[in-house]
Image (cartoon, helix red, strand yellow):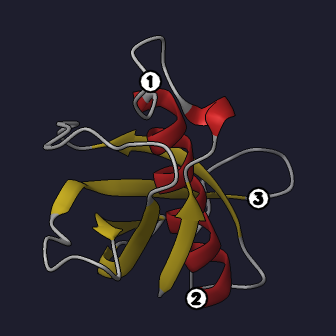
């Protein structure tokens, strides 16, 4: 699944670049959307992200591409690989700025782990 996000003023830190927390939010949301689309009748919560490392700074007005792919489905959890790139139609440098694995656990109506399938 692919998703896009426009970097606006409210997403910037005090140095004028994308605030890392905003990016983490979008990564989590993109992976969550994918999990719900893959398993529409299930409820998920985030239990973890792998390594968090920002590879490049992101400027105001940048368009970010979030590519989400399912990596693994367990009995009660599912993991997605999320890769983020800057998309610039005027440049060939559309390099990766971030990637991580996001893991969700499936919960029942009482908040207990339950099987996905």
Task: Please name which of the two marks, 1 or 2, marks the residue nearer to the observer.
Answer: 1
In which quarter of the view is residue 89 placed? bottom left
Residue that mark 1 sits on: 16
Instruction: Please identify, in this view, whether the residue under mark 2 or under mark 3 is nearer the observer.
Output: 2
Write the residue at 76% across / 58% down: 108
Counting residues from the start of the chain, the first of labels 2 and 3 encountered is 2
Alpha carbon distance from label 2 to label 3: 17 Å
Quick one: which residue is furthest to the right in this view?
Answer: 109
Residue under pointer 2: 38
Task: Give the crowd class for mark 3: few <14, some 14-19, many >=20 residues within 10 Å.
Answer: few
Q: Does residue 53 appear left or right of residue 64 in this picture?
A: left
CB of mark 1 within 8 Å of CB of mark 2?
no
Residue found at the far front of this picture: 90
Task: Determine the secondary structure under disc 2.
Answer: helix
Q: Nearer the viewer, residue 8 or 44?
A: 8
Of 17 and 90, which appears nearest the observer?
Answer: 90
| Mark sitting earlier along the chain (1/2) | 1
> In which quadrant is the C terminus drawn?
bottom right
User: Is any part of residue 83 visible from this angle?
Assistant: no
Q: Is residue 43 left or right of residue 66?
A: right
What is the CA distance from the residue labelled 1 to the residue labelled 2?
Answer: 36 Å
Sequence-first tag of 3 and 1 = 1
Residue under label 3? 108
Q: Compared with residue 113, is residue 50 higher up or lower down, i.e. above or below? A: above
Give yes or no for contact between labels 2 and 3 (Cβ–Cβ under 8 Å): no
Can residue 114 be seen here? The reply is yes
Image coordinates of residue 19 in percent, x first then y, are 46, 28
Count of residue discs: 3
**Nearer the viewer's eye, disc 3 or disc 1?**
1
Residue 31 lies, with reference to residue 14, above or below; the image says below
């Amino acid at each position: 699944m692919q998703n896009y996000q426009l970097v606006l003023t409210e997403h910037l830190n005090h140095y004028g670049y994308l605030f890392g927390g905003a990016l983490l939010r979008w990564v989590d949301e993109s992976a969550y959307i994918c999990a719900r689309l893959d398993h529409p009748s299930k409820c998920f919560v985030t239990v973890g992200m792998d390594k968090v490392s920002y590879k490049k700074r992101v400027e105001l007005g940048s368009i970010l591409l979030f590519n989400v792919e399912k990596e693994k489905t367990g009995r009660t959890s599912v993991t997605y690989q999320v890769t983020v790139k800057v998309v610039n139609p005027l440049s060939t440098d559309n390099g990766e700025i971030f990637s991580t694995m996001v893991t969700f656990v499936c919960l029942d109506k009482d908040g207990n782990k339950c099987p996905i399938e």
